[in-house]
Image (tube, rainbow, N blue to C red):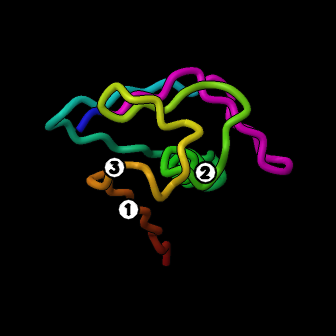
Amino acid sequence: MSLQVTDLWLDLGEFHLRGVNLEVTPGEYFVILGPTGAGKTVLLETIAGLHSPRRGRVLLNGEDVTQVPRSAVPSGLSIRTTRSSRT
C-alpha cells in the first residue's frame, strides 16, 4: 500500500500544520519523530481521516481519500502512537 501526503495544511484550534509532504512506498517503513507538541499525532489522525485538512491531499494507492468518510477508506493502514516515559 502506498501513501502520499501533498501540501497538507490543517488548523486545529491554536495548532497548525503547514505544507506537510511525505511519501511511503509499498514495503517501506516510515517513522515520524519529533518533540512533544510538534504535530505527529495530529498528522497521523488527519491521514486516518479524523481531521479535515484546510488544504492538501492524502492519497492511498493513488486514490484521493482526503474527503472520503473514514468508514470508506481501505483497510491495511496501521497507525501506532507511543509515548516514552522519562524518569
Image vertical order of residue 45 relative to residue 26, above or below: below
Task: Please report contact status of discs 3 and 2: CB closer than 8 Å, yes or no.
Answer: no
- Give left or right: position of 36 versus 29: right
Residue shown at 53% from the left, 43% from the top: 68
The residue pinned by badge 3 equals 74
Rounded to the nearest angstrom, the CA distance separating label 3 from label 2 is 20 Å
Q: Quadrant of residue 33?
A: top left
Residue shown at 85% from the left, 48% from the top: 14
Residue shown at 38% from the left, 62% from the top: 80
- Give left or right: position of 73 versus 49: left
Element marked by disc 2:
helix
Question: The residue under label 1 is which amino acid type?
Answer: Arg
Question: The residue under label 2 is which amino acid type?
Answer: Val
Q: Quadrant of residue 61?
A: top left
Task: Please report contact status of discs 1 and 2: CB closer than 8 Å, yes or no.
Answer: no
Element marked by disc 3:
loop
The residue pinned by badge 2 equals 42
Image vertical order of residue 28 relative to residue 33, above or below: above
Question: The residue under label 3 is which amino acid type?
Answer: Pro
Which callout, 3 or 1, points at the residue further toward the start of the chain?
A: 3
- Give left or right: position of 10 versus 77: right
Q: Quadrant of residue 66?
A: top right
Image vertical order of residue 7 relative to residue 45, above or below: above
Rounded to the nearest angstrom, the CA distance separating label 1 from label 2 is 12 Å
Rounded to the nearest angstrom, the CA distance separating label 3 from label 1 is 17 Å
**Number of residues whose C-alpha sits closer than 10 Å to that of mark 2, classed few (under 14), some (14–19) or many (20 or more):** some
- The span shown in magenta is 3-19
Please name which of the two marks, 3 or 2, marks the residue nearer to the observer.
3
Assign the N terminus to one quadrant of the image.
top left
**Number of residues whose C-alpha sits closer than 10 Å to that of mark 1, classed few (under 14), some (14–19) or many (20 or more):** few
Residue shown at 61% from the left, 47% from the top: 39
Which callout, 3 or 2, points at the residue further toward the start of the chain?
A: 2
